[in-house]
Image (cartoon, helix red, strand yellow):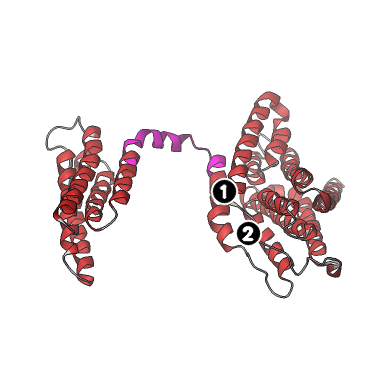
Amino acid sequence: MDFQELISRFGLALGIGLLFGLERGWRMRGEPPGGRTAGIRTFGISGILGGVVGATARTVDGVGAGLVLGLGLAAFSAGLAVFCLEENRAQKDFSATTWVAALLTFALGAYALVGDMRAATALAVAGSMILALREPLHGWVEKLTWTELRSALVLLAMTFIALPIVPDTPIGPFGASHGVLLAGAAGGLASSTAVTIANAQRAASHEGSPRILAAGVAMASAVMFLRACAIVLALNASLLELVAPPLLAAAAAAVVSALIGAYWRRSDRPDAQTFKFSNPFAFWTVVGFALFLGAVIVVGRLVGEWLGGIAAIIGAAVVGLVDVDAITVSLASLSPQPLGTQDATIAILSAVGANTLSKIAIGGIIGRGRFALEIIAMAFACFAAGALAFWTTLAILHR
């Protein structure tokens, strides 16, 4: 490293410290001299100090470089922690923001000497923005509802958990069938609607057998029915007497449909062994589903406000088109007051039924052809089994 580059890197380390110090100093500008742990000068010097430690590490070979960096950060962290602790005691506060920001300043100052200067700059700007946006971020968290948080987590789970682990190659001697059923079940843990969209797109592009792809949707639907049961069991077990029979019957019908679609008359399908299978969630599919989900939730809330007393059932049906879990959580929490047990049950079943109807629409609009017919047959079987179980349950209870 020549002298000019060395000075440039030290300048960046100083700039990083001044950037963090500017934000910290502005935020605590009302404090009297000596009333704060660190301001613009302390942060600026911390950036330079990190740069010095980084430059020293560059002069040492092998493990020694790591020891210099580690010991330097540990010593800086311990010394600063003492002052931050005293500041918190004086102010009767529990914030660790200044301490963490100072550690980041030191670390980025060191990285400016040993790593990529552009990355160090970008991280410094990002860190300063997070510090500066404290009030908007806290306000956003306070206004965030459980439904919105859960929806975001579901989408993240689909993208970063389900996407990497679901099968993308044939499994066993009947790989296509096994793979799509396993992927459908795994995807159904997050969103059976997203599985339907993904499989419908593959059916439309002739990536595999429409019958097997529809079987994957049936398996995801079965998991959705069971998931709704689990939510009711966890939040309001008194509803299970009415909710469980139709949902379990519908789940059984969906599983039978999946098995028939995956394994019946396999010899009739020349593409059964050459089925091209990939992960059930594409990134842009998940993004599109997120936008669709948000729009439907907004519409559901508007319907609830406009329709008053009958909003529970109609609103549940609207929101249930794409999101069964959130509305099930809400309805289970509203029974027995202000919603009666039977009203809450009908609303939950309406949400589940609407979600099943949305699969028919997706199959007809996106998948078309044989895929759509298979989805219709599966949905009809689920509706028939669920309705029969619900009618039988009511007849037994009111005998």
- Assess disc 1: are there few (<14), some (14-19) or many (≥20) residues with their C-alpha within 10 Å of its C-alpha: many
Kindly indicate the quadrant of the structure image that contains residue 78.
bottom left
x and y, in percent, of residue 342 in the image: 75, 40
Q: Amino acid at mark 1?
A: Leu
Residue 146 lies in the magenta-colored region = yes
SS of the residue at dot 1?
helix
Kindly indicate the quadrant of the structure image that contains residue 216.
bottom right
Please say whether residue 208 is visible from this viewpoint: yes
Picture residue at 21% right of the left edge, 36% below the top: 25
The residue carrying mark 2 is 279
Q: Amino acid at mark 2?
A: Asn
What kind of secondary structure does the magenta stretch mostly adopt? helix
Compared with 270, 303 (above or below) is: above
x and y, in percent, of residue 248 in the image: 76, 55
User: Could you tell me how far apart the alpha carbons at marks 2 and 1 are, in whole angstroms?
Assistant: 15 Å
x and y, in percent, of residue 267 in the image: 85, 70
- Tell me where the magenta segment starts and ends, as one range: 130-150
Q: Which mark is drawn over residue 283?
A: none
The residue carrying mark 1 is 155
Q: Is residue 240 left or right of residue 298?
A: right
SS of the residue at dot 2?
loop
Extreme-left residue of the structure: 33
Q: Is residue 61 left or right of residue 255?
A: left
N-term-proximal mark, 2 vs 1: 1
Please say whether residue 84 is visible from this viewpoint: no
Kindly indicate the quadrant of the structure image that contains residue 56.
bottom left
Picture residue at 23% right of the left edge, 72% below the top: 62
x and y, in percent, of residue 325 in the image: 64, 46
Q: Are marks 2 and 1 in contact (CB under 8 Å)?
A: no
* Front residue of this view, candidates 133 and 61: 61
